[in-house]
Amino acid sequence: MYKLLIADDEYEFRNGLTRFFPWNQVGFEAVKQAENGKEILDIVLTNEIDVILCDIKMPILSGIDVARELRHSHIKIVFLSGYREFEYAQQALTFGVKNYILKPPKFHELENVFKGLKEELDQKKDLSASQLTSEKEEGPVFETLISRIKRYIEQNYRDATLEGTAKFVHLNQHYLSKYFKQKTSENFSDYVIRVKMEKAKELLADRNSKTYEISEMVGYSNAKNFTRMFRKYTGKSPREYRNQE
């Protein structure tokens, strides 16, 4: 069974949709409910969710906001709304939303949409299974979001910031920070510092480079701040670290 999250700011509507549509007959289990976009993002951080069925217009964060934040995730999104304006549907497609169903949903529409989603998810699962058998020889086919984030930091360590990284992966800063911590058990800022300090250790191997030059190379305009952070990270000043080599 694939995991479904149903979100709508009307409790009776979302609860009725959760309880009375035979989700198990189309291969889904309605495991969570949310009443706004922020709750959706909080739920997907700590729960396995395959598909989100949500209203476009919700408090705090709209369905469009959610689609924008999750556009690079594996989660499929289906919009459910009473708003017939074409621009909503058009913008939804921009963020990879799979379907757009008008309220009140007709039984056969929900059935057709989710049967189609199940087939798509089944195909993706089969593809992933086949990739696992060849991954050791050919390498992973799909780069994970975390690996993209780490690669960006490692390539841009001098100027890497939470804001810049969030823009690169098209995520909200707050969501990216929570997601990174949840997936790696390390704070985003701590990882950036670790990358900077490890690079500094490499650069210190070149005795022709001055400490203030290395400080600038890893993104510290103030050499004293760099020395303080380096000592905190290694237990030694840059000079002490270099002299032990």
Image (cartoon, helix red, strand yellow):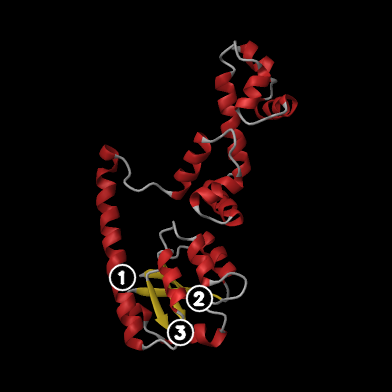
Q: Earlier in the sequence, mark 3 or mark 2?
A: 3
Dot 3 crowding, Cα within 10 Å, few <14, some 14–19, many 20+: some
Residue at label 1? Answer: 118
Label drawn at residue 56: 2
Instruction: Determine whether, in the image, residue 53 is placed left or right of residue 232.
Output: left
Instruction: Determine whether, in the image, residue 74 is placed left or right of residue 236.
Output: left
Q: Quadrant of residue 237?
A: top right
Residue at label 3? Answer: 17
Determine whether the residue tagged by mark 2 lies in a helix, strand or loop. Answer: loop
Query: Which of the pair 118/60 is nearer the observer?
Result: 60
Viewer-side label of 3, 2: 2
Disc 3 residue type (three-letter): Leu
Q: CA distance from mark 3 to mark 1?
A: 18 Å
Q: CA distance from mark 1 to mark 2?
A: 22 Å
Query: Which of the pair 48/196 is nearer the observer?
Result: 196
Q: Earlier in the sequence, mark 3 or mark 1?
A: 3
Dot 1 crowding, Cα within 10 Å, few <14, some 14–19, many 20+: some
Label drawn at residue 189: none
Query: Which of the pair 189/84 is nearer the observer?
Result: 84
Q: Is residue 50 at all visible to an observer of this figure?
A: no
Query: Which of the pair 185/143 is nearer the observer?
Result: 143
Can you give x and y, in whole percent of width and height, for residue 242 in the image? 63, 14
Q: CA distance from mark 3 to mark 2?
A: 16 Å
Can you give x and y, in whole percent of width and height, for residue 201 in the image? 58, 22
Residue contact at pointers 3 and 2, CB within 8 angstroms: no
Q: Is residue 194 above or below residue 118?
A: above
Residue visible at 75% across and 25% down in the picture: 224
